[in-house]
Image (cartoon, rainbow, N blue to C red):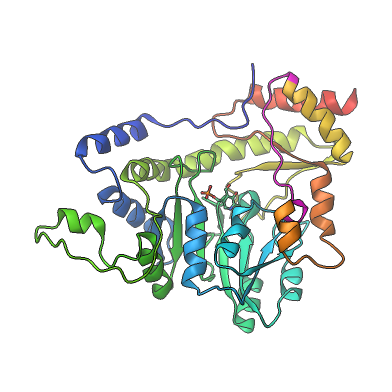
Amino acid sequence: MNVPFFKTKLSETAIQAVTDVLTTGWLTSGEQSTLFECEFEKFIGGNVNALTVNSATAGLHLVLEAMVVGPDDEVIVPTLTFTASAEVVRYLGAKVVLVDIDPETLCGDFTAIEAAITPRTKAVVFVHFGGYPVDITPLISTCKRSGLRLVEDAAHAIPSRIGQKHIGTMGSDAAVFSFYANKPMTTGEGGMIITTNQKVASRCQLMRTHGIDRDTFARFTGKSHQWRYDVVEAGYKYNLTDIAAAIGRTQLQEVDKLRIGRMRNAEWYDTALEGLPLTKPPRPGVKSDHSWHLYPIQLHGGSKTREKVIRLFAEREIGYSVHYTPLHRLTYWAKTARIPQDGLPIADAYFDGCLTLPIFPTMTKDQNDLVVATLKEALFT
Ligand SMILES: Cc1ncc(COP(=O)(O)O)c(C=O)c1O
C-alpha cells in the first residue's frame, strides 16, 4: 500500500457533465460558467457577486487591479503563504510588506498587520492558511479605520465557515477561491472571485476578458447578431472555460461531502498523534467548519527530525509536502519585500519542523494508520 499526497477522484456526474459540454459545440466561457457563478453565489450566500476566473492568481490580480493598487502603494501579506498571494502585488508595481503569523491560527497576525501600516499602505491580503476559518472582524475594523482595502485569499477555504457564514462574507472587500487540482474543490485549474462591491465586480468582469465591453458568448450567440464591440482598457485573458465550469458545478454539489472525508482524516490524525513530540494543526471553535485542505504538523525536533521522517516516507511511498517555505526565506521576496527589522520569528519557528501529512477525501483508515505508524517509526528509532 502506498499513500499519495493527494488524489483527485471525480464523480461519474462530473465526467458526464464534461462529456455533455464537449458535445454542445461551445467549449469556452458561456452557459456553464454563468450557471456556475449563479450556483456559487447561492452556495456562499451574503448577496455576493461571483466571477469565474482561470486561476485564483488571476482573481487576486483582478481584484487588486480593481482596487487601483499601483506603484506608489504597499500591500501587507503574511509570510506563510504561496508566492501567488504576493506576486500579484508586484504585477501592479506595488511593494509587498511581509508580516508574521499568529501561532494560534497560522494565519496573518492582526497586531503585526496593524503595526505594518504606513501612509502608503493600500491593502491587506489575508490568507486563510490551510482553510482555517479565521474570524476577521477585528481586521475589518482596522482596515476600515485606516482606509485600507481587505482581500481574503481563500484559495484553501471552501467550504470553511464561522457559524453559518462562509469565509469571504464577513465584510472584506473581496475574496478569491482556488480550484487548482489539489484544492478542496477543483476544476483542474480555475478560481472564483466573490465581492459585494459592484464597482469591483464590474471592473473585474471587464478586465477578465481583454477590457472588451461586451460578453463574448452573447456576441456569438445573440439573436441580434451584434458583432460590434469596443475595447475600453488593456485587459487580461482570465476567463474560465465551460469544460472547467461544468466540473466546478458538480464539485460544488459535492464539496460538503468532500470536506467530511478530509475532516474524518483530520480526526483520525488528531487522536493517533496525541502525546507525540509534535504540534497538531490548530482547530477552530465548535461552531466553525474547517475545509481541512491541509494537515500541517510541527515536529518538535525541527528540520533534522523532518529530514528523518521524509526519508522514511519516501522509502515507504508516502506522500508529504511542506507548506510553506515562508516568503521572506525565498530569494525574490528577500530582495524585494519589506521585512521587519527583527525578522518574522513565529513563521521561522513554524517552518523549522513543519510537515504536511496527506489528507484527501477518499483516504482510508488503513492509509491514515500507515502514515501515523511510519511517522512514529521515524520519531522513535
Ligand atoms: C494560498 C494560495 N493563494 C493563491 C494560490 C493560487 O491559486 P491558483 O493556483 O488557483 O492560481 C494558491 C495555490 O496554491 C495558494 O495556495
Q: Quadrant of residue 219?
A: bottom left
The residue at the point 39 percent across, 70 percent down is 203
The residue at the point 55 percent across, 36 percent down is 261
**Horizontal side, residue 75 vs residue 224: left or right:** right
Tell me where residue 328 appears, x and y as whole percent. 76, 56
Which of the two residues, 271 or 227, is positioned nearer the viewer here?
227
The boundaries of the magenta stretch are 315-330
Tell me where residue 49 appears, x and y as whole percent. 39, 65
Quick check: can you spot residue 139? yes
Which of the two residues, 45 or 101, is positioned nearer the viewer here?
101
**Horizontal side, residue 152 vs residue 356: left or right:** left
- Compared with 137, 158 (above or below) is above
- Compared with 90, 359 (above or below) is above
Q: Is residue 323 magenta?
A: yes
Count numbered badges in the picture: 0
Q: Is residue 298 magenta?
A: no
- Compared with 369, 150 (above or below) is below
**Horizontal side, residue 169 vs residue 228: left or right:** right
The N terminus, quarter of image: top right
Q: Quadrant of residue 95?
A: bottom right
- Residue at far top of view: 1
The residue at the point 28 percent across, 32 percent down is 19
Quick check: can you spot residue 101? no
The residue at the point 26 percent across, 38 percent down is 21
Which of the two residues, 187 or 67, is positioned nearer the viewer here?
67
Which of the two residues, 241 or 227, is positioned nearer the viewer here?
227
The kind of secondary structure the magenta stretch mainly shows is: loop
Tell me where residue 138 appears, x and y as whole percent. 66, 73
The C terminus, quarter of image: top right
